[in-house]
Each structure stands twice: as structure tokens, then as C-alpha cells.
Image (cartoon, rainbow, N blue to C red):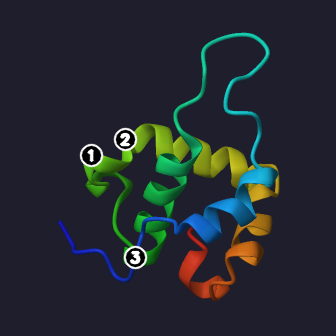
Amino acid sequence: MPPAVGPAELTDTEWERVRPLLPPQRPPTGRPRHDHRTVLSGILWVVRTQSSWRDLPLEFGRWETAYKRYRLWTDTGLWQRLVALLGDAPSTLQRK
């Protein structure tokens, strides 16, 4: 498994900037979502290291959860807004 390139964990400052954009952690009905901060950190680990989703370290949860959340956020345009707020170069946070 490749080592992380740069920090994958969100700092408290980064988290406070992106948190308002995310959907409620506990939806009105159904089960609570997996922790947004953990999942987002996992997505950042994958895109920053350019690793496979399946190589995602367990500390970020299941790779399937991170991948599905990434696809959802990309399809709804939320990912692009998160990238803009985090201030990373788009080339380091865009994934095909």
C-alpha cells in the first residue's frame, strides 16, 4: 500500500470550512450516515496518493463507502465546491 502524500486528515480549520456544505449527518429518516469527516479524509487520501480505492486504509472506513460518497458528491457538484474551499490545486483532487 502506498504511503500517504501529505496530510489526508482534515485539519479543524479545513473541517469548519467544508462542514456547512455537507448534508446533515443524521438524515430525517433512516440510518445515520457514516461520519462525513472520516469519509472525506479517506477520499482525500485516495485522490492525493492516486491510490486505488481498495487500498484505502481502514482508519478511513470501508473503501466502498468512500467511493460511493465520492461518486455522489461528484455527480451533485458538491465535490467541486469542496475542492474549491479546501484550496488544493484541482489536479491533486480530481479523480477519474
Q: Who's the residue at 68% across and 24% down the image? A: 26
* Apparent side of residue 70 relative to residue 61 in the rendered image (left or right): right
Give the spatial CA distance, label 2 vs label 3: 17 Å
Residue under numbered circle 3? 7
Extreme left residue here?
A: 1
Residues at badges 2 and 3 in contact (C-beta under 8 Å)? no
Give the spatial CA distance, label 2 vs label 1: 5 Å
Q: Is residue 27 above or below residue 54?
A: above
Residue under numbered circle 2? 61
In the rendering, which numbered label is found on residue 84?
Answer: none
Q: Which image quadrant for residue 85?
A: bottom right
Q: Residues within 10 Å of mark 2 (few under 14, many from 20)?
A: some
Q: Is residue 9 above or below residue 48?
A: above
Residue under numbered circle 1? 58
Secondary structure under badge 2? loop
Question: Given the image, on which type of amino acid does mark 1 rest?
Answer: Leu
Give the spatial CA distance, label 1 vs label 3: 16 Å
Res 79 visible: no
Q: Who's the residue at 60% across and 51% down the image? A: 70
Out of 66 and 60, give the one closest to the viewer. Answer: 60
Q: Which image quadrant for residue 27?
A: top right
Out of 8 and 16, give the one closest to the viewer. Answer: 16
Where is residue 40 drawn, in percent x and y? 54, 55
Q: Who's the residue at 63% across and 49% down the image? A: 71
Q: In this view, does 23 lie above or below 7?
A: above
Question: Given the image, on which type of amino acid does mark 3 rest?
Answer: Pro
Question: Given the image, on which type of amino acid does mark 2 rest?
Answer: Gly
Secondary structure under badge 3? loop
Q: How crowded is mark 1: few (under 14 residues within 10 Å), some or many (20 or more)?
A: few
Where, quadrant-wise, is the C terminus in this rendering? bottom right
Q: Who's the residue at 57% across and 65% down the image? A: 12
